[in-house]
Image: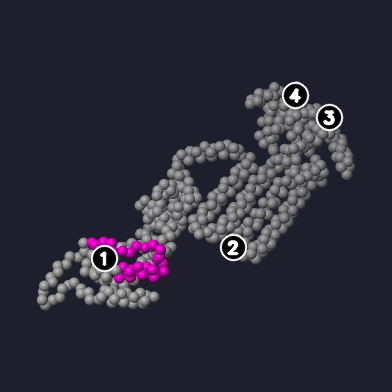
Amino acid sequence: MRKLLIVSLCAFSFFNLIAQGQNVDTITYNLSTPYDAVLNHLKYLQPDSYYPEIAAKSLHDKRNGKTDIVELSTKLKQVFDGSGLYIELDDIPRETNYKDSISNKSRFQLSKKYPEIYVEKYGNRWLYSKKSVNKIEGLHSDIYPFGTGKLLELLPPNSGSFKLFGLWGWQLLGILILIIICVVLHKVFTLVIEKLIIQVLLRLGYKKLADEVVVPVAKPISFLIIFPLLIVLVPVLQLPIGMSRYVILALKAIWPIFAIVFFYRLVDIFSLYLFKMAEKTESTLDDQLVPLLRKVLKTFVVIVGGLFILDNLEFDITGLIAGISIGGLAFALAAQDTIKNFFGSLMIFIDRPFQVGDWITSGDVDGTVEEVGFRSTRIRTFRNSVMYIPNGVITNQMIDNHGLRVYRRFMTTISMTYDTPPELIDFFVDGLKEIVKAHPKTRKDYYEIHFNNMASSSLDVLFYIFFEVPSWTEELQSRHEILLEIVKLADRLGVNFAFPTQTLHVETFPEKKGNSPEYTNTSPELRKKLEEFISKKD
């Protein structure tokens, strides 16, 4: 079959030459300048002047077979057409003794896209260099992968039943076939993703994931697969270079857009997974970290995707990245505080000195943490105002995290009047200890309740205990309960609370009793009253 095809092509070339009335041996060519070498190669591979043997004269023939160099000449033209590389002939020098200003050698590079393809002077002739000839096979395989280069051997170089819009009939047919393939693949991939994958997610209970993430990303995924297929197959059509360069450029530029959409949605799926993991931990700081991480990843996806688009549009992103680096350095110097706050937020997430909901004291700030951002931490004060503290500041200050307390201390002084008998003081202190033991939210292994001071107007009992409660609200409720029990105990035993007053006592009026209370209860009576009080609480 292959021999038959070769014979047919040779016959076609022969009849074409007869039709044109010109023999290969009578064609003259010039290779005296870089311009002439490239022009000779491209001119005689055109549909209206297809003489591959003459075009092959522009290549350095280091091989022994004529067929090999002719085939390489054709493949080099296919490399230019398949990559959409348009050779500007007017930019090629027409000097016989031209020398490259950088290397000071007699060579000229055709394009920055393929620096290994250049013409070089050999004696009095300019030819595609030995190195360039050796690279043709590799470049051809890169542009026509998966065996698509073999399809080019089956296509006629300059024939067709008719020509429309500058395209041969077989090229128009190929475009139609590609469109049909893309439509079918798009429908199949969309159906598979929307039906099968979504049904699986719904059965597993991930309805939100299916509705909000998978459905919007179904079409971008199908295009993400179709466009690489088009990038591989479109060069096989051998479109005119004026059309091919823009079609291939557009395909390569559009494909990263669907990749951006896909990975952008993939970040949402990953964030949803992290959010579920964060819900399983006790720390609420993880809940703040997940949205911030999602924003960073999405920004990263957009920036990297944008660089890929610019690169595929053949912009010099090296200079752009270098400019960004220099601009980034200037920006870093101008935004030192912002960068300091950013790294301060990272230290908060790593060290976790506090989390959302903790009551903290840092410098003059005292309140509850509401949100930890990349720049500042938002704290709700007890005045119900909101304070924003730069993270760079808060990480350099001493932080008192009240939210990490296992026990919450409560200390007060209970003052009794000076006329309280010693026995009553002992029973009262014992009763206070029993109140602490009976309360469900007090620390039982450590507390201090003692008669420890004789003030100017009172006998003072130190009441020093700890509550085992998670929040300030529960602490206040426990204080309320303890203080109420103290008042009830004092009322039950007849203890009078002292307060700072100045009283003038006149004890000698015969018709009036003294102001001091009369204590008539004996120790057994007081003990009985205390036991009744305790038993009543039980």
Q: Disc 2 versus disc 3: distance between alpha carbons?
A: 68 Å
- Helix or strand or loop: what does disc 3 sit on? loop
Image-based side of 473 in relation to 78, left or right: left
| Residues in magenta, as a range | 427-455
* Quadrant the N terminus occupies: top right
- Helix or strand or loop: what does disc 1 sit on? strand
Residue under the point 63% across and 60% down: 215
Q: Does the CB distance between marks 2 and 3 fall below 8 Å?
A: no
Q: Which residue is mark 3?
A: 64
Figure quadrant of residue 476: bottom left
Q: Position of residue 229 (x, y in %)?
A: 72, 49
Q: Nearer the viewer, residue 419 or 228?
A: 419
Tell me which amino acid carries mark 1. Ser
The tag earlier along the polypeptide, 2 or 1, is 2
Residue under the point 61% across and 54% down: 266
Q: Disc 4 versus disc 1: distance between alpha carbons?
A: 113 Å
Tell me which amino acid carries mark 4. Tyr
Q: Which residue is mark 2?
A: 208
Image-based side of 133 in relation to 416, left or right: right
Residue 119 appears in the picture as rendered: yes
Label 3, residues with CA under 10 Å away: few <14, some 14-19, many ≥20? few
Q: Which residue is mark 4?
A: 122
Tell me which amino acid carries mark 2. Lys
Disc ID at residue 415? 1
